[in-house]
Amino acid sequence: MLQACERFGCLPSQLEAEDGELIRLLAIERLGTPEQQREEV
Amino acid sequence: MGYVRQRKVYRLRFADEDMAGLVVQARSAPVGQFIGLTKLAQLRGNDVTPEDMGKLDELFRGFAGCLESWNLEDSDGTPVPATLEGLYSQETDFVLQIIFAWIEAVAGVPGPLGKPSSDGGRSLEASMPMETLSSNHLN
């Protein structure tokens, strides 16, 4: 959550207000990211 | 006059024999609420203890707020309302199956039932948002 906030430059409360579909987009991006480049979310 | 963004509506269809023909339409939820509901959904219908009932109630209430419509009917053909009361009128496992499918559709990640299970699998169809409805399409 905090990493996502850093990434998008927003507060957790703002991130929590985003549509749940954001989780899917992050998961898709993660699938396309080499394992050694992944950061735990 | 302000603009209110409409949340996506997912149409869930189930290919499981027991749930074939069921169509559920449910909106997505904000990330914060969705994560909370996903944690609550770690409950398994068979494993629910009296202490878990509060969590189950919270999960059902949260999902009821996103449930738009369904074509569920009672055995006598009476439509079951797509409300919290309607959810509570059904078997817990049945409702959890719907909620897990909804979680998978919104977030694209398997819900708890994605794990190996001996009680039958879920439909892949349920994991695909079939369409996004807007007010324009509804008219």
Image (cartoon, coloured by chain):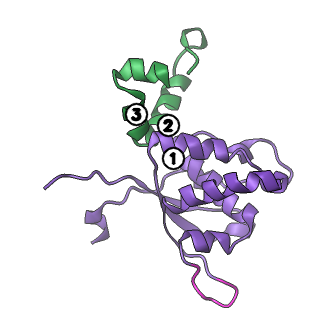
Chain colours: A green, B purple
* Total numbered labels: 3
- How crowded is the residue under tag 3: few (<14 C-alpha within 10 Å), some, or many (20+)? few
- Does residue B77 show up magenta in the picture? yes
Residues drawn in magenta? B74-80
Residue under the image location 76 percent in, 41 percent down: B115
Marks 2, 1 in one chain: no
Question: First in sequence: mark 3 or mark 2?
Answer: 3
Task: Label 1: state its secondary structure.
Answer: helix
Marks 3, 2 in one chain: yes
Image quarter for residue B35? top right
From where the camera sits, is residue B52 visible? yes
Q: Look at mark 2 in the image and give the residue it sits on.
A: A24
Outermost residue on the top side: it is: A36
Q: In the image, residue B56 lies at what x, y percent?
A: 69, 55
Q: Gap between marks 3 and 2, in whole Å? A: 19 Å
Q: Nearer the viewer, residue B57 or B66?
A: B57
Q: In the image, residue B49 lies at what x, y percent?
A: 83, 53
From where the camera sits, is residue B120 visible? no
Q: Look at mark 1 in the image and give the residue it sits on.
A: B106
Q: In the image, residue A10 lies at what x, y percent?
A: 34, 25
Marks 1, 3 in one chain: no
**C-beta proximity under 8 Å, tags 2 and 1:** yes
Q: Main secondary structure of the magenta part?
A: loop
Q: Gap between marks 2 and 1, in whole Å? A: 7 Å
Q: Look at mark 3 in the image and give the residue it sits on.
A: A13
Q: Split into 4 quadrants, where in the image is the C terminus of chain B?
A: bottom left
Outermost residue on the right side: it is: B118
